[in-house]
């Protein structure tokens, strides 16, 4: 099943990562905070101290042909009934300018909207880049 979103969370939630994020394996809980209800960007902030923070976004808003097949392993690991319980975000890298923002399409964050269990998955069998220019993809 290919995931499609377009539904945004409008209030702060806490995501629980059993394994943490890649490179941040010790941090298990993050607050998911909408930056603005009109755009698909969020802060993903360490829940306890708030010291570690990422910007994440809905990749389908910018890259309509981005697709992920939910293997049974993903559905089971996140304790989802089926793929309709799952949402996807990608980490945004803001460098020297807004125009040069990139997103990591190779390692999306997938979470269950019902229990807020999350995991960052590496898509080994799909040819997506780690640094994909966001605005050029959106035609903006």
Image (spheres, rainbow, N blue to C red):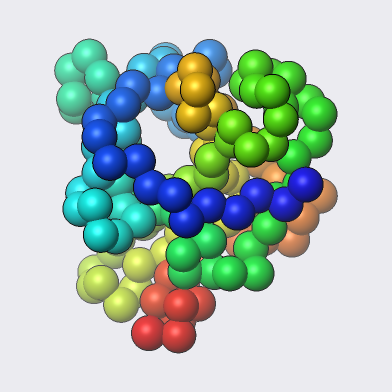
Which corner quadrant of the image does residue 105 belong to? Answer: bottom right
Judging depth in this view, the residue of 77 and 48 nearest the camera is 77
Q: Residue at x 36, y 18 (%)?
A: 29
Q: Percent position (x, y) of residue 38?
A: 25, 59
Q: Can the viewer see residue 32? A: yes
View extreme (bottom): residue:
139
Count of marks, rendered view: 0
Which corner quadrant of the image does residue 9 belong to? Answer: top left
Which corner quadrant of the image does residue 50 belong to? Answer: top left
Q: Residue at x 30, y 77 (%)?
A: 99
Left or right: 131 as drawn, with respect to 121: left
Which quadrant, please, contains the C terminus?
bottom left
Q: Percent position (x, y) of residue 125?
A: 81, 49
Task: Please determine whether, in this image, residue 1 is positioned above or below residue 30.
Answer: below
Q: Percent position (x, y) of residue 6?
A: 47, 56
Q: Residue at x 65, y 23 (%)?
A: 80
Task: Please determine whether, in this image, residue 90 is positioned above or below residue 73.
Answer: below
Q: Can the viewer see residue 104? A: no
Left or right: 72 as drawn, with respect to 115: right
Q: Residue at x 28, y 41 (%)?
A: 10
Task: Please determine whether, in this image, residue 3 is positioned above or below residue 111.
Answer: below
Q: Percent position (x, y) of residue 13?
A: 31, 26
């Amino acid at each position: 099943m290919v995931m499609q979103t377009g539904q945004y969370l409008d209030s702060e939630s806490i995501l629980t990562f059993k394994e943490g994020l890649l490179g941040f394996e010790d941090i298990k809980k993050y607050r998911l905070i909408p930056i603005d209800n009109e755009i698909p960007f969020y802060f993903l902030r360490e829940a306890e101290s708030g010291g570690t923070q990422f910007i994440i976004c809905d990749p389908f808003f910018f890259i309509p042909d981005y697709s992920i097949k939910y293997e049974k392993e993903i559905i089971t690991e996140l304790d989802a009934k089926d793929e309709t319980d799952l949402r996807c975000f990608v980490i945004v890298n803001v460098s020297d300018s807004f125009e040069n923002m990139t997103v990591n399409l190779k390692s999306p964050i997938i979470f269950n909207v019902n229990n807020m269990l999350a995991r960052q998955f590496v898509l080994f069998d799909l040819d997506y880049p780690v640094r994909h220019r966001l605005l050029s993809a959106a035609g903006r």
